Image: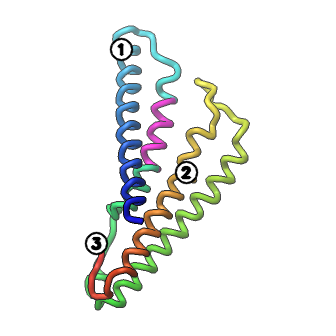
Amino acid sequence: MDAFFRVVRRGERYLLIAIMILLAVFCFAQVFWRVALHNPLAWSEEVSRYLFVWLTFIGAAAAVGEWCHFQVDVLTSKLPPAPARYFRVFCYLAILFFAYVMTFHGWELLQRIRTQFSPAMRLPMIVPYASLPLSGLLMALHLAERLHNDFRRPAGEGRA
């Protein structure tokens, strides 16, 4: 099971790296064509915007996997190990609910916009919006791993 989650994390990282490279290339191309050639590209701004959306949502899911989101641990640091574990589980379940909402309503959104196309590139709008349910699914996977790992170890061992 741990190998599966390592593959998921590695895939997220590679996807994020690829998106960052493409974002840099398209932004550079837009600036170059606009400034040097005085002929701005009509499509590069749109592609960059959609890549940034993907970067944001997949990055948020990767941050859940690495447990890197902003958190205040004043309460959990003062609790004994067993109650702290249950509070963490409550937090996991709250985030899992958010991931469910992202996935479910993101999928509904994809069904409603499946016939729409972007203005500059005529790209199906499903492409940029697909990051929403995918991010929710990835968050749910990471939270399932956290829940599994928290209950696999003794109550006295905390999880960062």
Callout 3 crowding tier (Cα within 10 Å): few <14, some 14–19, many ≥20: few
Q: Give the residue pinned by disc 2.
A: 132
Q: Residue at x 33, y 81 (%)?
A: 153
Amino acid on which the number 3 mark rests in the picture: Ala
Q: Nearer the viewer, residue 33 or 105?
A: 105
Is the image coloured rainbow, by chain, by secondary structure, or in one colour? rainbow
Q: Which residue is drawn at 53% across and 58% down?
A: 137
Tell me where residue 40 sits by quadrant: top left
- Indicate left or right for 85 with 93 as reference: left
| Depicted 18 relative to depicted 122: above or below | below
Q: Which residue is drawn at 40% across and 37% down?
A: 19
Check if residue 147 falls in the magenta segment: no
In the rendered image, residue 157, in percent from the top left (x then y), is placed at 27, 83
Q: Residue at x 35, y 62 (%)?
A: 69
Report the magenta residues as a range.
47-57
Foreground disc of the pair 1, 3:
3
Foreground disc of the pair 2, 1:
2
Marks 3 and 2, how far apart at CA: 27 Å
Q: What element carries label 2?
A: helix
Amino acid on which the number 1 mark rests in the picture: Val
For the C terminus, give its image quadrant. Answer: bottom left
Tell me where residue 64 sits by quadrant: bottom left
| Nearer-N-terminus badge (1/3) | 1
- Secondary structure mostly seen in the magenta stretch: helix
| Nearer-N-terminus badge (3/2) | 2
Q: Give the residue pinned by disc 3.
A: 160
In the rendered image, residue 23, in percent from the top left (x then y), is placed at 39, 32
Marks 2 and 1, how far apart at CA: 34 Å
Marks 1 and 3, how far apart at CA: 48 Å
Q: What element carries label 1?
A: helix
Callout 2 crowding tier (Cα within 10 Å): few <14, some 14–19, many ≥20: many
